[in-house]
Amino acid sequence: MVGAWVLTSCSLLERADLVLHNGPEPETIDPQILTGQADGRIASALFEGLTRFNPTNGTAMPGLASHWEISGDGLSYTFFLRPEARWSTGEPMEADEVVWSWRRAVTPATAADYASQFFCVRNGRAIVNGELRDASRLGAEALDAHTVRVHLENPTPYFLELMASRVFFPVPQRAVERWGDHWIRAEPLPCSGPYELLSWRVNDRFRLRRNPQYWDAAQVMAERIDILSGDNPSTALNLFLNGEVDLISDRKIIPGELGPELARRPDFHRFDYLGQDFIRFNTTRKPFYDARVRRAVAMSLDRSRITARITRMGERPSAAVTPAGTGGYQPPAGLSYDPVTARRLLAEAGYPEGRGFPAIEYTFNVGSRIYEQTGVEIQSMLREHLGIRVELRPLEWKTYLAEMSALNYDFIRGSWVGDYDDPMTFLDCFLSDSGNNRTGWKEVRYDRLLQAAAAEADPQRRLEILRQAETLLVEEAVPVTGLYSHVGLYAADPRKVGGIWPNRMDEHPFFSMRRIRP
Amino acid sequence: MRPWMARVALIPVLLWVVATLSFFLLRAVPGGPFDRERAAASREVEAALKARYHWDEPLWRQYGRYLGSVMRGDLGPSLKYRNHSVNDLLGQTVPVSLSLGAMAFGVAIGLGIPLGALTALKRGGWADYAAAGLTLVGVCVPVFVLGPLLVLVFGLWLGWFPVALWGPWQNAVLPTLTLGLYFAARVARWMREGMLEVLRSPHVQTARAKGLSETAVILRHVVPVALVPVISYTGPMLADLLTGSFVVENVFQIPGTGAFFINSFFSRDYTMMMGMVLFYSVLLQVLNLMSDLLLRWVDPRIRS
């Protein structure tokens, strides 16, 4: 028995300098393939982009590229790689490898879900959509060993931030060519970020060591880091309270029902987060194919009741889709609480006082007390203000996703977390041909407005067009109506852990993180 | 052919039935592994992903492909963890669950048998009542209550043991107790009943009448027979210990197989789910066979 234990326990590990709880086991840590937040955190410890996130505010700062030049029309970016940039295994990183990596990401056979981030790069969309078979037509070229030039389809104000996101990280070409999809498990794994991988045990931990080849290694203040994987929030909290974990980096792994109480502690940090909860309406069938009915429902929701009684973390009630302040943008107010107008709209649609209104279901995914209670609250508000009856339909996660994509619902809980700090990351979900639309709503005017915004070189004018588009989305057509903007929460004792700051991107780069010694 | 050889021969047939049933049942559940919150970048990308896992082929061909690879000992790639195969995930996690189960089994037997024997011998005394009370509590308190309770007292308050994770021996104490105590209580009850029954039986009276010392009577004539109900219970109990540790593994964040039992279904990781089902089918068969063989060896009545 003891033998069995010795075989399975890690060789008696001493405590790492810094221990993070990262939430669920990553599905993959291949930077170009991954989609999950937990996955992305590991990847960003091991790899870096041409830019990296500023830990204080989540904006872009120099990474593997020391500097760059932007053409006057904003359509071409020239990045200058640091000559000292190399892989942890010693090979230099050159411009060809960067371009090769991006071609890998856009090639459909790679099956990178985030390849859509390349749509702003010339020919990126055509290659990802399979219209162009030759990935070398992507608008990226190596001018010499240390210079990469990118040609964009449109001026993209958030392009430098995009370069700091995972799907743009260069990957080690030789390792990928040798090992194929399993390159990420090569030993040693060539890393370009502040840390390199020592070991990876599923559902247990990643153990990382400072990467001496990292160009900014002098800044990296921890020799070893353990990143724990687990999905029980109570256990994560116990580990944190007991001092075995220094940082809980994901709100999902902090017990939800304790959130409001924990947020008052000095070692828990709350911040406005780039995410939004909303309701999708199925615009393809009765009764929500009528925009008046959708607007009536949107106007009978007192969203502050949900944030004050249920979520209780200081979330901002919002009837829009984009959280306020995203990329310096103020979204339209959306259809706010107005039961009188709501009743009139419902009467106009043929259901005075809710008479004759068909039985409808509100669908949501199980797993959080908050979604269920929100459903109950919506149920009672619609009964109260419109006189209509709503059944609640809780579904397990994958069934919920399948039903939503198949448009097999009446109205349904939805949410979105932005990939970059710009309203486009929320608004392009509702393009007619977007796989994330899931409402059946197709509106040429909306598509054209987003195209016009993308082509607009003047940043203020661009935001103004986006605002017109969002007004159409959440005030006029209303295939979707907002509920509230998310609040993030992480745990870190400021007396023990330094170098991390709350920011709306929830990006906490590893290069600046350190353990403060007593 | 001996009956146990027939049972061994039946194992592959049983596995085929289990594999076939679970393959088609899983496919009948709504939602699939590639239903995700974020839609794929394009239809091409989605098609490439599905093609990689042969999802674009007709179901019967997928089934044939799966059976073929299982027969070669390859349980296929995990549909959720893209850098891992099912063999790899089981290889990493099964030893952990087995060692936790084995240690808990040690606690169950090591505590349960002496406790049961003691209470039977001191029947009606205060020790009997105390132990009976204790075992009743042990049987009634579920592991998802006992685990956090032990963590609270011995981890957070007293600081004697780590609150979670798998590492040096100190980490194994609380999860082993959590899992073991419940079964120790059950073993104690089985043992007590077995002992009481045997103590009343004529052959014990005969042994005493022959003038054997009480210790010799107990050790030679009572305990072996009283163990029969305990042993017949150990097969299923071991299976419970090795498979039923989901809660304990979750509470203590132990990197065993428990998490996959639940999560691979919720994420529709079909290959992982089937790998688990097949693995535990084999395990259960082998354990049941072993406890039957042990019983035949201990209890002459079964042999005849």
Image (cartoon, coloured by chain):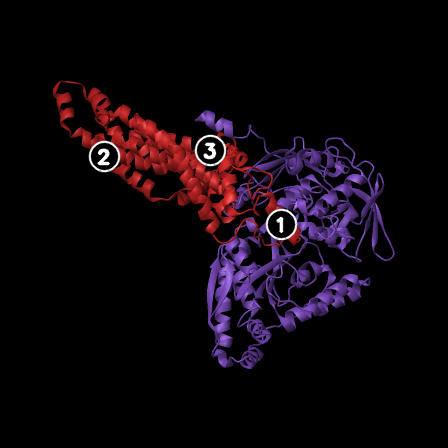
Chain colours: A purple, B red
Foreground: disc 1 or disc 2:
1
Measuring from the top left, give residue A389's x and y in whole percent. 46, 72
Q: Quadrant of residue A95?
A: top right
Measuring from the top left, give residue B171's x and y in whole percent. 49, 34
Distance from the alpha carbon under mark 1 to that under mark 2: 62 Å
User: Chain letter of disc 3?
Assistant: B
Residue beneath disc 1:
B47
Residue beneath disc 3:
B172
> Do the numbered discs 1 and 3 sit on residues whose CB atoms are within 8 Å?
no
Residue sitting nearer the eye, A257 or A470: A470
Foreground: disc 1 or disc 3:
1
- Identity of the residue drawn at 60% across and 39% down: B83
Distance from the alpha carbon under mark 1 to that under mark 3: 45 Å
Label 1 SS: helix
- Identity of the residue drawn at 51% across and 47% down: B59
- Identity of the residue drawn at 77% across and 51% down: A160
Residue beneath disc 2:
B193
Measuring from the top left, give residue A230's x and y in whole percent. 54, 43
> What amino acid type is highlighted by mark number 1?
Ala
The answer as to whether the residues below labels 1 and 3 share one chain is yes
Measuring from the top left, give residue B150's x and y in whole percent. 43, 40
Callout 3 crowding tier (Cα within 10 Å): few <14, some 14–19, many ≥20: many
User: Chain letter of disc 1?
Assistant: B
Label 2 SS: helix
Residue occupying the far right of the picture: A72
Label 3 SS: helix
